[in-house]
Amino acid sequence: MGSGRTGRVERFSLRNAYGEALLELGRRRKNVVVLDADLALSTQTARFRKAFPDRFFDMGIAEADMIDTAVGLATTGKLVFVSTFAMFAVGKPWEQIRNSAAYSGVTLNIVATHSGISVGEDGSSHQCIEDMALMRIIPGTTIIAPADDIATYALVMKLADHEGLSYMRLSRPDLPRIYAEGESFEIGKAKVLKKGTQGTIIATGSLVWPSLEAADILASEGISLGVIDMHTVKPLDEQPVLEAAKRTGFIITAEEHTVIGGLGEAVSSLLSECCPTRVKRIGIQDRFGESGSCDELMDFFGFTPEAIAKEIKEAL
């Protein structure tokens, strides 16, 4: 991610973890079906297609039809996973997600890959930085952004028993591993990774690891920060947020998403009502992305550990 500190860190694919979790669910449950929109090799649903061809449906570049078909399958008792790039998973079929899926109350899992600006050279037309905001405003939704491959696998397995409309966003680039094999996760329960005294970074998805690194950088300068992995953005796990706010008096949110409507606003809304606290939101400001390599864009938008540390230090 454009940092000398990160250059030697081994990275793992979240998309591969998703593909492996689908395979395992397919073995365990005969009612699992998967739909994709002509991107199965990129989303890694092709593994499920190869193992269970009679339970896989390539809907072509017809995302609205894919969502409506998925809703129909869900009403017959199928456990449905729908995948494509984030821009096409949420941006194109939003009306079908709202009216056909959410309003009807079915259980449906949308797992989108290639979220955020780190999709890189595909440019702003393919960089979905508004997906969490679009899904947050739909009543009753669950929104998940895993921080590494271990969290991705575990949370996909949890989705199999989770009711309602769920949306998971995955990064295209491989990410450093934060968790050990076998780590347990609960949808809606954040992970407190580190406690500090001068502030707490609440991060989600791809920015959890840079936030941990940023906290380490500042610790070397005598600044004590906590870090929370808010892998479920909705429903927000309120207790650790309020506890950190009361204890440190300063909250920083970090997300590879627009600061409008995402994690930062969810945390700010909670704190404004329950525990007024100073908040610094790190994310993409009111603008579109740019075309460039993943490393270049993470540098440009200030998502490297050094940039996050610098921004926090200036705000302290």
Image: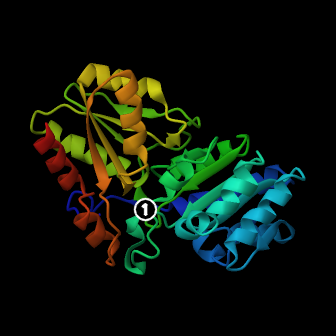
Outermost residue, right side:
76
* Rendering coords of residue 155 (x, y %): 60, 45
Tag 1, which secondary structure?
A: loop
Picture quarter with the C terminus: top left
Label 1 belongs to which residue?
129
Name the kind of residue labelled 1 in the image: Ile
Q: In this view, does 230 lie to the left or right of 95?
A: left
* Rendering coords of residue 123 (x, y %): 39, 78
Q: In which quarter of the image is residue 10?
A: bottom left
**Residue depicted at x 30% and y 43%:** 212
From the viewer's perspective, is residue 36 above or below residue 61? above
**Residue depicted at x 46% and y 27%:** 238
Nearest the viewer among 22 and 181 is: 22
* Rendering coords of residue 47 (x, y %): 69, 69
Q: In which quarter of the image is residue 125?
A: bottom left
* Rendering coords of residue 157 (x, y %): 67, 46
Nearest the viewer among 79 and 281 is: 281
From the viewer's perspective, is residue 134 above or below residue 227? below
Q: How many numbered discs, if any?
A: 1
Q: Residues within 10 Å of mark 1 (few under 14, many from 20)?
A: many
Q: From where the camera sits, is residue 76 visible? A: yes
**Residue depicted at x 24% and y 25%:** 249
